[in-house]
Image: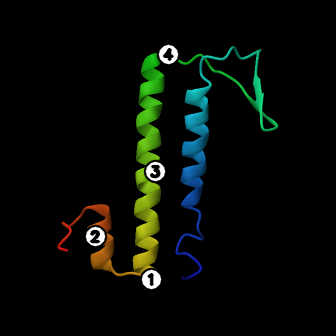
Amino acid sequence: MSGGHFDYKQAYLGYIADQLERDIAYNAIPYDAAIVKDGEKYYGHQLQPQTVEFISDVVEQLRRIENILREYDLAVSGDSCEATFQERVGITPNTA
């Protein structure tokens, strides 16, 4: 595998998605009553349901974009090919 067309920075999108999921999971916790879990403090933000729904959609988009960029990286680095990229990201149907 190559050094990564994007220097593996596309993985940062997954980190952001993970953080947003934590924000959603701990949303109802009062901000002044953080939960401590595995040495981390988690604060709630009391976001409105429509904001949580919107951010949930953003999480899905981030994960999809991260996957697309990973597959693109594999294609342009020679670890796969453009046809495989197209198939894996849904540009062309799976012919197998």
Q: CA distance from mark 4 to mark 1?
A: 44 Å
On residue 79, which mark appears?
1
**Element on which disc 1 rests:** loop
Residue positioned most to the right: 39
Relative side of 12 to 86, left or right: right
Judge by depth and name the residue closer to the eye, 90 or 6.
90
Q: Which mark is first along the chain, 2 or 4? A: 4
Return the x and y of residue 87 as percentages of the image width and height. 26, 69
Q: CA distance from mark 3 to mark 1?
A: 21 Å
Judge by depth and name the residue closer to the eye, 7 or 24.
24
Q: Amino acid at mark 1?
A: Asp
Q: Which residue is mark 4?
A: 48
Q: Which residue is mark 3?
A: 63
Q: Which mark is first along the chain, 2 or 1? A: 1
Q: Amino acid at mark 3?
A: Arg
Return the x and y of residue 21 as percentages of the image width and height. 55, 36
Q: Which residue is mark 2?
A: 86
**Element on which disc 3 rests:** helix
Residue neighbourhood size for the residue with mark 2, other residues' Cα within 10 Å, grouped as few (<14), some (14–19), many (≥20): some
**Element on which disc 2 rests:** helix
